[in-house]
Amino acid sequence: MVQAYHIITFETAFTSIEFMHENIYHFDNKATVVFSNSIEPKDLAVRFGANANKISHVKTASTKDDPGYQSIVTAKFEKVDKTDFDVFADGIVLDESNTCAVIYTADCPSVTLYEKVSNRLVLAHSGRPAMTPNNKEGEPITNIITLAFKKITEGVQNPKVSAHITGYICAEHFEHIGKEAELLIRPFDQFGKIAFLNRERGQLDLPAIIEHQLSKLGVPKDSIKSESICTFESPELESYRRDRSSKRNLTVAILH
Ligand SMILES: [Zn+2]
């Protein structure tokens, strides 16, 4: 079930209006994902049931040269200061009750895969770099989605995976024009026509690719939920494409 709350707070009558955005998704009563523009990840995590000392702040990779690019690791909880990071990775596994992982995005989809048999989840940063296939042409596609699925189903007989995709920039607003941009999107042609809304304009459709990949991996269509909120079009959410700013939205995943 998806619940959207839009709480409007008027701090003073004329000077400041703050729009709070929280999209909440529950994997039954086993796990929760919150997508928010909050700047207080710890408060948010604790409010949704996380142990305050078990919050893993994850620094994801913005390019393939950044630490942790396309890597998936088990959560660590070393830092308590919200300005520091516990892990450098594009995917993080939670396997303990009341633990939490936080990633920061500003247009990239975040994907949570919950596996029912082992009661574990993986939260994966699934923007263009992590989603870029890293296989050789003609070989089976590997990217953050195949890696996350492999990680979460490892050693599980008859795994039961369900998925949630947070808000992201829609394909219409995610154009790639010019030679340099073309090099970034070319690997996505391996997915065929579904990868682009309009190939000429390089309108890369990451959520369509994610859903396509998960379906091919055997996740039932009705177990894949997508928030369908465009960060570029939602003024209360951060969007790098729109503002070129360093502000980020939060995705908080909690295993209950
Ligand atoms: Zn849009």
Image: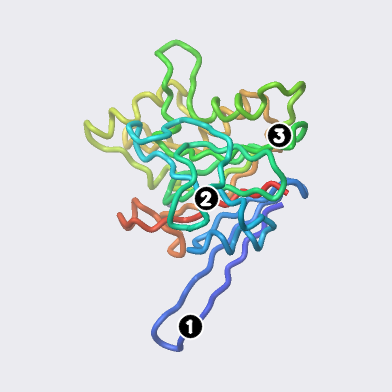
Disc 3 to disc 1, C-alpha distance: 42 Å
Q: Label 1: which residue?
A: 11
Q: Position of residue 97 (x, y in %)?
A: 72, 46
Q: Which of 216 and 40 is in front in this view?
A: 40
- Secondary element under disc 1, as helix, strand or loop, is loop
Ligand 1 is within 8 Å of the C-beta of the residue at disc 3: no
Circle 3: residue type: Glu
Disc 1 to disc 2, C-alpha distance: 26 Å
Q: Position of residue 230 (x, y in %)?
A: 47, 52
Q: Label 2: which residue?
A: 167
Relative to 242, is 68 on the left or the right?
right
Which label is found at residue 115? 3
Is residue 98 placed above or below 139 in the rendered structure? below
Circle 2: residue type: Gly
Q: Which of 215 and 97 is in front in this view?
A: 97
Which label is found at residue 22? none
Disc 2 to disc 3, C-alpha distance: 21 Å
Label 2 crowd bin: few (<14), some (14–19), many (20+), radius 10 Å? many
- Secondary element under disc 3, as helix, strand or loop, is strand
